[in-house]
Image (cartoon, coloured by chain):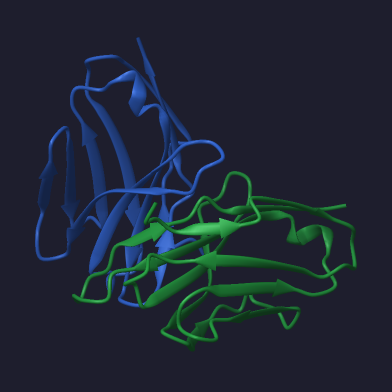
Chain colours: A green, B blue
Amino acid sequence: DTGVSQDPRHKITKRGQNVTFRCDPISEHNRLYWYRQTLGQGPEFLTYFQNEAQLEKSRLLSDRFSAERPKGSFSTLEIQRTEQGDSAMYLCASTLPYGFQETQYFGPGTRLLVL
Amino acid sequence: DQQVKQNSPSLSVQEGRISILNCDYTNSMFDYFLWYKKYPAEGPTFLISISSIKDKNEDGRFTVFLNKSAKHLSLHIVPSQPGDSAVYFCAASTGNQFYFGTGTSLTVIP
């Protein structure tokens, strides 16, 4: 399987706990994006990486959220002190490295439920 | 503010007929547009895209039309099949960021 993978697929946690999600992009893709999707909405941009560099962050990404891509391969998204409003599907996508116009390929997502 | 809008939350079409999904955008700087299909419990799957220098792109049963003056794009599926039943998202890009609509749930009735 050469697609984007995410782990875990589901996470239930109590308010105030920390959670970490992992994304493994398609191997030759050097750009990696994180999105959040809530019910009835489209994916909302959170942040993206070009190799290991985090180049842009949305204002949606509060200081409780941090993302890393230490070796330019897999990425992690951590949420500290989770709140019920963090309950959502967290999607990762990666893009082909060449060309002006990119097409993103999405992973299956991690569904987070904060109780 | 929602820069990409899909004003029809749902659409039902008979099998074999044409499905037309619409999308409007507000940012004239968008230069690349995409359609994604999403099944429950899965991530969005890329379907078809179009550059702002074109007004039509076709791939099998799927055709995307872009009307830049109206800031409107549409996805045509002909003929529609039951397996096309899914949520369809349009997305627009200025380069590094992608903006998604809220989706249209398409049901193709056998």
The number of callouts visible is 0
Q: Is residue B68 visible?
A: no
Q: Residue at x 27, y 59 (%)?
A: B33
Which of these two is toward me, B22 or A9?
Answer: A9
**Which quadrant is home to the C terminus of chain B?**
top left
Position in image of residue A73 (x %, y %)? 46, 77
At x 52%, y 50%, the residue is: A108
Image quadrant assignment for residue B59: top left
- Residue A87 appears in which quarter of the rendering? bottom right
Q: Residue at x 44, y 73 (%)?
A: A32
Residue lying farthest to the front in this orientation = A1
Q: Position of residue B72 (x, y in %)?
A: 26, 52
Q: Position of residue A33 (x, y in %)?
A: 47, 71
Residue at the extreme top of the image, as rendered? B110
Left or right of residue B66: residue A31: right
Q: Of residues B74 and A14, which is closer to you in this image?
A: A14
**B54 w.r.t. B78: above or below:** below
Residue shown at the point (22%, 15%) measured from the top left: B16
**Residue A107 visible (yes or no):** yes
